[in-house]
Amino acid sequence: MSDRRALLLVYPGFAELQVAPALDLLRGQVEVVVAAPARGAVRSEGGLAVLPEATWEELAGQPFAAVLVPGAIDLKAAYHHAALPALLAAAASGAEVVGAICGGPMLLHAAGLLDGRRYTTNFSAEQRALLGAPEGSYVDDELVVDGRLITARGHAHGRFGLAVAEALGIDVAPLRHYVLQSRASCAPPAAPSAAC
């Protein structure tokens, strides 16, 4: 295992599916450190209980090769958490890659990390305006790479995972087809489906 570390931010209701492909591709290559607002189990959107290794405050100022920020149906508690902006700003400053998916880019915005950067998100123009997110750099696309910053819409979790792994120099060629096939099976359906 490499001595490089990736910071995975979790908080109540985080969408675990959005970061699953990235975590699968990082396995054995990068140590993933899971951090939450507080100690104790954190329930994901799907009900998965995750036990973080540290709190956001405990990791402030520590170096990470990557920062991963999943979205959630309700970001309010995470968005307004006092420790989040400092942790994200410090972790992102030395990171090789900062990745945020779905609503996760709005947490980057709370830390000032979207200023002057192209990004995408699942948030509507109205939601972005309400939070004061930079509208001029918003890109209406599934995946946006702007230097070290990788953002994606929630349904592009496969492409997001590949982009994060590639940015860290991980050879994803053997898994590219598998990851993209998995993503294709969860593309937004024309009508609600129990498959995804």
Image (cartoon, rainbow, N blue to C red):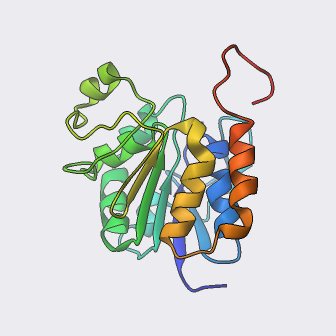
Drawn side of residue 32 relative to residue 124, left or right:
right
Residue 143, horizontal then vertical, whole percent = 46, 45
In this view, 153 is above or below 124:
below
Residue 114, horizontal then vertical, whole percent = 27, 48
Q: Quadrant of residue 133?
A: top left
Residue 118, horizontal then vertical, whole percent = 29, 47
Nearer-the-camera pick, 162 or 45:
162
In this view, 154 is above or below 127:
below
**Residue in the picture at 65% in, 35% down:** 45
In this view, 90 is above or below 143:
below
Inspect this view and state whether residue 141 appears: yes
In this view, 95 is above or below 113:
below
Quadrant holding the N terminus: bottom right
**Residue in the picture at 64% in, 78% down:** 29
Number of numbered callouts drawn: 0
Drawn side of residue 57 relative to residue 41, left or right:
left
Nearer-the-camera pick, 124 or 86:
124
As drawn, the residue found furthest toward the top would be 191
Drawn side of residue 100 relative to residue 27, left or right:
left
Drawn side of residue 86 relative to residue 70, left or right:
left
Residue 159, horizontal then vertical, whole percent = 58, 50
Inspect this view and state whether residue 14 appears: no
**Residue in the picture at 80% in, 28% down:** 195
Nearer-the-camera pick, 8 or 162:
162
Quadrant holding the C terminus: top right
As drawn, the residue found furthest toward the right would be 195
